[in-house]
């Protein structure tokens, strides 16, 4: 780093936003929903065509916060309220790393990595938090036939500050579901205004709730597009991102602020909320490209050249390591960190990503791997819940020639099995040397000890 002080970091994460939804990825007006603010953000920095995530909400958020694949952390799937869930206190979060570097940290949105004291955001490195501890489909609970609050925890919007107990703010029902993103952005902007005056660097994490089902827009956006709730919600999401960008500009801190925007996973598969991954096949909860690849972009005026587009492989775990580098923080050395430092690639100092591939698990099962232009499937399930086929001989696809993963080329291109097997074996040997944290492990569990 050559600048005198570390930059502010703003990380906005959409929920269930498919690769093909935004205008800058071939969607926008095609989907009945122009996205001019996000499209402009992409044009002002680096837009990724091959940014990869985990299978759904929890594992991606775990990978983002820890720099580790969720098979290591035990945070592999969504768990109902009242049951052990989230990332274990032994894990070191991105917010904790940045706090040590003197960053003020705020989070406004969906956490989904722990829903009790000790595991809330305010316990995991964030100075303040407002949002939901789990997920948005819970907003349908109180309107569901036969709902019994004596046997299921009521879903709440919550808030908390470091060192204080978290508190319930309001029941997360369908009406609140429509309003929540507007409140998340209002609090985000208030946080930035306060910290811009303090002259301290800040990290603000804004995991929005759109476009997660039930995909319902704020009342101000209902009917705005004439193309239904989904399009209205996407237009609202674009507007909310624009509100953050406008605040950054008004505060005069654009050149001192890195803005990341992306999605936690591929599009929803359930109708009527199903989204699209554009040219890629599949949705989240699968190992198809439509699950792995999501829209992602980063803007840093004066440091990252505007108008760049890349198809280099980057993975969500890389954000942990790269943001740590931006902030001047050291990543933990007492555990495997799967993220690689992409700082020099972002700035254009290196022409290629430092990553050639990665392994892909769904829960505890190795489903696939990517390497360069190739994909290997060990388990085949192109649509969720259609009954996975465990392949006797893995299937190979060339993603450049075959984005829909329709033509298996394992016989004529069998040479790629060697690099794939080395990639997989190296990772699985790492799991043997460093046993994973079991899902639902209690706080007192000590990794590495039986």
Image (tube, grey):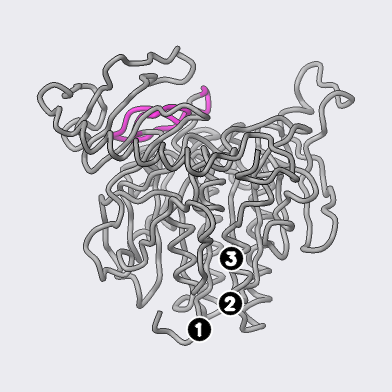
Label disc, if present, on residue 97 of the rendered structure:
3
Crowdedness of circle 2 by 10 Å Cα count: few (<14), some, many (20+)? many
Q: For mark 2, what is the residue?
A: 201
Secondary structure category for the residue under label 1: loop
Q: Taking 176 as reference, is 166 above or below it? A: below
Q: Is residue 42 left or right of residue 259?
A: left
User: Mark 3 vs mark 1: which is more N-terminal?
Assistant: 1
Of marks 3 and 2, the one in the foreground: 3
Nearest to N terminus: mark 3 or mark 2:
3
- Residue 112 seen in the current view: no
Disc 2 from disc 1: Cα separation = 8 Å
Gap in angstroms between the C-alphas marked 3 and 1: 16 Å
Q: Farthest bottom residue?
A: 4
Screen quadrant of the N terminus: bottom left
Front position in the image: 393 or 125 = 393
Q: Is residue 377 above or below residue 436?
A: above
Q: Residue at x 36, y 61 (%)?
A: 342
Label 1 Cα neighbours within 10 Å, binned few <14 / some 14-19 / many ≥20: few
As drawn, is 412 to the left or to the right of 79? left
**What residue is drawn where x is 49% and y is 30%?**
268
Q: Which circle, 3 or 1, is nearer the viewer?
A: 3
Residue found farthest to the right: 150
Residues drawn in magenta: 270-289
Residue 417 numbered mark, or none: none
Of the 4 image quadrants, the one containing the C terminus is top right
**Residue that carries the numbered disc 1 in the rendered image:** 5
- Residue 96 on the magenta span: no
Label 2–label 1 contact, CB within 8 A: yes
Q: Earlier in the sequence, mark 2 or mark 1?
A: 1
Q: Position of residue 175 (x, y in %)?
A: 73, 38
């Amino acid at each position: 780093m050559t600048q005198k002080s570390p930059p502010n970091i703003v990380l906005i994460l959409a929920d269930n936003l498919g690769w093909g939804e935004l205008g800058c990825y071939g969607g926008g007006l095609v989907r009945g929903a122009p996205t001019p603010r996000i499209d402009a953000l992409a044009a002002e920095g680096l837009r990724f065509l091959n940014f990869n995530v985990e299978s759904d909400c929890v594992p991606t958020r775990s990978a983002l916060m820890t720099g580790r694949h969720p098979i290591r952390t035990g945070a592999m799937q969504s768990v109902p309220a009242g049951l052990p869930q989230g990332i274990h206190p032994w894990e070191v979060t991105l917010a904790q790393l940045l706090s040590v570097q003197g960053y003020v940290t705020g989070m406004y949105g969906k956490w989904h990595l722990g829903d009790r004291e000790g595991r809330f955001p305010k316990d995991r490195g964030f100075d303040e938090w407002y949002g939901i501890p789990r997920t948005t489909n819970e907003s349908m609970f109180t309107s569901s036939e036969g709902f019994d609050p004596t046997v299921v925890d009521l879903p709440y919007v919550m808030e908390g500050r470091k060192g204080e107990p978290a508190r319930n703010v309001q029941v997360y029902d369908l009406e609140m579901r429509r309003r929540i993103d507007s409140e998340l952005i209002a609090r985000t902007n208030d946080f930035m205004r306060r910290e811009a005056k303090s002259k301290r660097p800040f990290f603000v994490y804004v995991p929005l709730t759109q476009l997660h089902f039930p995909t319902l827009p704020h009342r101000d956006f209902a009917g705005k597009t004439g193309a239904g709730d989904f399009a209205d919600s996407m237009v609202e999401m674009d507007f909310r991102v624009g509100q953050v960008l406008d605040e950054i500009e008004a505060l005069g801190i654009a050149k001192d602020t890195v803005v990341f925007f992306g999605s936690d996973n591929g599009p929803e598969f359930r109708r009527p909320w199903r989204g699209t991954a554009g040219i890629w096949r599949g949705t989240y909860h699968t190992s198809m490209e439509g699950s792995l690849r999501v829209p992602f972009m980063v803007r840093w005026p004066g440091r990252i050249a505007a108008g760049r587009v890349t198809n280099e492989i980057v993975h969500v775990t890389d954000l942990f390591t790269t943001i740590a580098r931006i902030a001047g923080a050291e990543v933990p050395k007492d555990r495997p960190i799967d993220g690689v430092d992409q700082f020099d690639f972002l700035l254009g100092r290196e022409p290629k990503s430092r990553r050639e591939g990665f392994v892909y698990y769904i829960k505890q099962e190795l489903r696939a791997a990517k390497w360069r232009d190739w994909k290997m499937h060990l388990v085949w399930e192109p649509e969720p819940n259609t009954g996975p086929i465990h392949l006797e001989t893995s299937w190979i696809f060339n993603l450049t020639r075959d984005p829909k993963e329709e033509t298996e080329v394992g016989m004529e291109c069998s040479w790629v099995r060697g690099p794939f097997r080395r990639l997989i074996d190296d990772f699985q040997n790492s799991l043997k040397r460093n046993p994973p944290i079991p899902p639902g492990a209690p706080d007192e569990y000590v990794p590495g000890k039986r």
